[in-house]
Amino acid sequence: MAGTIHVDIVSPEGQLFAGEATMVFAPAALGEIGIAPRHAPLLTTLTAGVVRVQVEGQDEHTFYVGGGALEVQPHRVSVLADTAARARDLDEAAAQAAKARAEEAVRGRTDRIDIAEAQAELVKAIAQLRAIERLRKKQR
């Protein structure tokens, strides 16, 4: 179809999505990017956040990614995620607990490397919670 772009979302655990979309939104290194069919070629890194895939005639598909790479070609988008999950599969209690642990680790560390690791975990936990919240809003 001329009005769609093929989207693949994969992680080390396997493929989460493969199909045609009318629009894709992803958390690129410098901010959220929107990708439409026939988009200019692009290669960038992903930050922890939400990937949204709009499919004609269906509800928007929402995924959490913990970082990775994004390749865009005029007729294909490839999301190569470090970690990924469907938003509906995320565990809110586990994400809240991870956020609390990361916040405590940030407060209790003095070594720069430990602080950086704790901050990275905090960013991932917050991104998961945002994905859960986005899914919750969509279901209302």
Image (spheres, grey):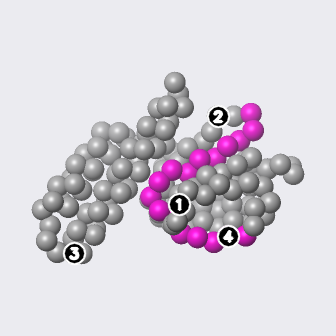
Type of the residue with mark 2: Asp
Q: Position of residue 51 (x, y in %)?
A: 56, 51
Indicate which label's residue lies in the foreground, 2 or 1.
1
Q: Is residue 76 above or below residue 129?
A: below
Identify the residue shown where x is 73% and y is 54%: 36
Counting residues from the start of the chain, the first of labels 2 and 1 encountered is 1
Neighbourhood count class around disc 3 (C-alpha, 10 Å): few under 14, some 14–19, many 20 upward: few
Counting residues from the start of the chain, the first of labels 3 and 1 encountered is 1
> Which mark identifies residue 112?
3
At numbered mark 1, what does the secondary structure look like: helix, strand or loop?
Answer: strand
Tag count: 4
At numbered mark 4, what does the secondary structure look like: helix, strand or loop?
Answer: strand
> Which mark identifies residue 2?
none
Residue on which the image places disc 1: 31
Identify the residue shown where x is 20% and y is 61%: 106
Badge 4 vs badge 3, beta-carbon distance below 8 Å: no
Residues rendered magenta in the picture: 41-57
Indicate which label's residue lies in the foreground, 3 or 1.
1
Residue on which the image places disc 4: 42
Q: Position of residue 41 (x, y in %)?
A: 73, 70
Q: Position of residue 90 (x, y in %)?
A: 42, 43
Q: Is residue 133 above or below residue 4?
A: above
| CA separation in Å, label 3 and label 1 | 25 Å
Counting residues from the start of the chain, the first of labels 4 and 2 encountered is 4
| CA separation in Å, label 4 and label 3 | 33 Å
Counting residues from the start of the chain, the first of labels 4 and 3 encountered is 4
From the viewer's perspective, tell me whether residue 7 is left or right of residue 106. Answer: right
Badge 2 vs badge 1, beta-carbon distance below 8 Å: no
Q: Is residue 12 visible?
A: no
Counting residues from the start of the chain, the first of labels 1 and 4 encountered is 1
